[in-house]
Image (cartoon, grey):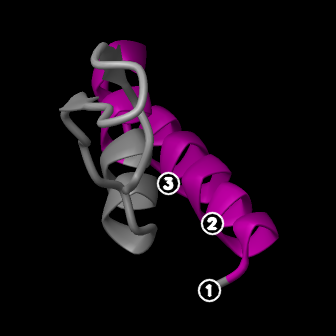
Amino acid sequence: MSNGWIILCMAAIFLGLGYAGVPVAFAIISGVLFAVSMTHVSLSTPRRCLRCRSSCWSVN
């Protein structure tokens, strides 16, 4: 699913739940949770760089 469709679905969920009477914060959270479930999101941990011996975010 492309980014545009994800944003469109997020907005539709937010507006639909808003019209249904769900509080705004919960409607936004549900839209964001939907978007996160449709994308590949990963939490990476810092690794020790072998070249500079410090913490860096390199993939290698």
The answer to whether mark 3 and mark 1 are in CB contact below 8 A is no
Is residue 42 shown above or below 55? below
Q: Name the residue under label 3.
A: 13
- Residues drawn in magenta: 2-30
Camera-nearest residue between 41 and 25: 41
Q: Distance between the residues labelled 2 and 3?
A: 11 Å
Q: On the rendered image, what quadrant is the C terminus found in? A: bottom left
Residue type pointed to by label 1: Met
Camera-nearest residue between 28 and 50: 50
- For the point 28% across and 53% down, the residue is 42
Q: Mark 2 points at which residue?
A: 6
The answer to whether mark 2 and mark 1 are in CB contact below 8 A is yes
Q: In this view, does 5 lie to the left or right of 15?
A: right
Disc 2 versus disc 3: nearer the observer: 2
Q: Dot 2: few (<14), some (14–19), or many (≥20) neighbours within 10 Å? A: some
- For the point 69% across and 56% down, the residue is 7
Residue 50 in percent (x, y) is at 30, 36
- Counting the numbered discs, the total is 3
Residue 44 in percent (x, y) is at 25, 42
Q: Name the residue under label 1.
A: 1
Is residue 34 shown above or below 26? below
Disc 3 versus disc 1: nearer the observer: 1
